[in-house]
Amino acid sequence: MIIKQIFNNNIVSTVDDKDQELLILGRGIGFQFRAGDPIDEARIEKVFRLQDSSIYERFKAIVTEMPIEILQVTDDIVSLARMQLGKQISDGIYVSLSDHIHFAVQRLEREQIVRNPLSWEVQHFYKAEYDVAKEALTILRERLGIDFPKDEICNIALHFINAEVNDSMNDVTHLMQLLQEIMNIIKYHFGVDLDEDSVNYFRFITHLKYFCQRVITHSSHDDTEEYLYKVVKKNYPDTFKCIRKIESFILKNYEYVMTHSEQLYLTLHLERLMKTK
């Protein structure tokens, strides 16, 4: 491999056999070298191969001021998240998460602790992401020698969530707000506390997340057979009454009209949840 560009002593770029640019990390890998020199492959510690060219350009813009340890630990955390969550995570997380960790380290050096108001929502609605973020805090402590506050679990989990939905962090915030609003309607309607560790709760929340995403993005979906819709409406009147409350709330506050398909499947998931509350 040949050096294409030297960013600093520890970061250079090269191109592969498909002419795709790669970022190569390694201590001293750019020290006393010039563009056109062969890369000392024994020094390679990390290789970043980002498919999205716009993300790659943003990543290149921040690496020059980013300590190599933060770039390395970011890559390890992203690899952990992809393995543990089993979901497609946008390469944009390399930019957002490394920048966040770098800034968090600087804040901690100044003893500035930022509380995250979404901690409860993330912990309850995105348990898998929260658990991985907990592991990430352990990695950060071991690799950087810094004890990050518990609030950082939520912050890191939000980066996973944001990269999954591939949308703005603002929409993620709206999504969790809507999740909480709908869950409040359900709890008040049935007057129960739900078992948040149950399989059916997990299934319901998973289905509800996709529904909330459609509400936030105003992308409705309807493929229901009207006969099935009428059968469910007749057989589960109390659950359907709760769905009607959700429908009215969303129409008033989000200007979104629930389709019969959405009412049907939300009723079925909610009915199953209530049977195992």
Image (cartoon, helix red, strand yellow):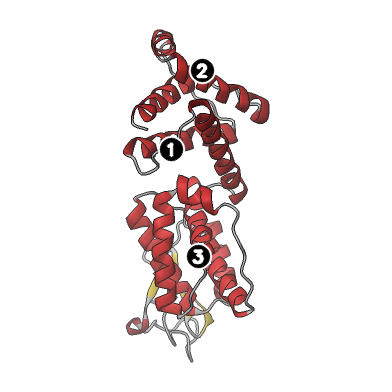
Q: Position of residue 272 (x, y in %)?
A: 35, 27
Image mark for residue 106: none
Q: Residue furthest bottom?
A: 32
Q: CA distance from mark 2 to mark 3?
A: 40 Å
Q: Position of residue 122 (x, y in %)?
A: 50, 50
Q: CA distance from mark 1 to mark 3?
A: 24 Å
Q: Secondary structure at mark 3?
A: loop
Sequence-wise, the earlier of marks 2 and 3 is 3
Res. 270 visible in picture: yes
Observer-nearest of 244 and 185: 185
Identify which amino acid the numbered label 2 is placed on. Lys
Observer-nearest of 57 and 199: 199
**Residue 245 sits in which quadrant?**
top right
Q: Secondary structure at mark 2?
A: helix
Q: Secondary structure at mark 1?
A: helix
- Determine the residue positioned at 51% across, 35% down: 183
Identify which amino acid the numbered label 3 is placed on. Lys
Task: Please give the residue where the numbered disc 3 appears in the rendered image.
Answer: 150
Q: Residues within 10 Å of mark 2 (few under 14, many from 20)?
A: some
Q: Is residue 209 above or below residue 271?
A: below
Image mark for residue 241: 2
Res. 52 visible in picture: no
Q: Are marks 1 and 3 in contact (CB under 8 Å)?
A: no
Q: Are marks 2 and 3 in contact (CB under 8 Å)?
A: no
Q: Foreground mark, 2 or 1?
A: 2
Sequence-wise, the earlier of marks 2 and 1 is 1
Task: Please give the residue where the numbered disc 1 appears in the rendered image.
Answer: 205
Q: Residues within 10 Å of mark 3 (few under 14, many from 20)?
A: few
Q: CA distance from mark 2 to mark 1?
A: 19 Å
Q: Position of residue 188 (x, y in %)?
A: 54, 30
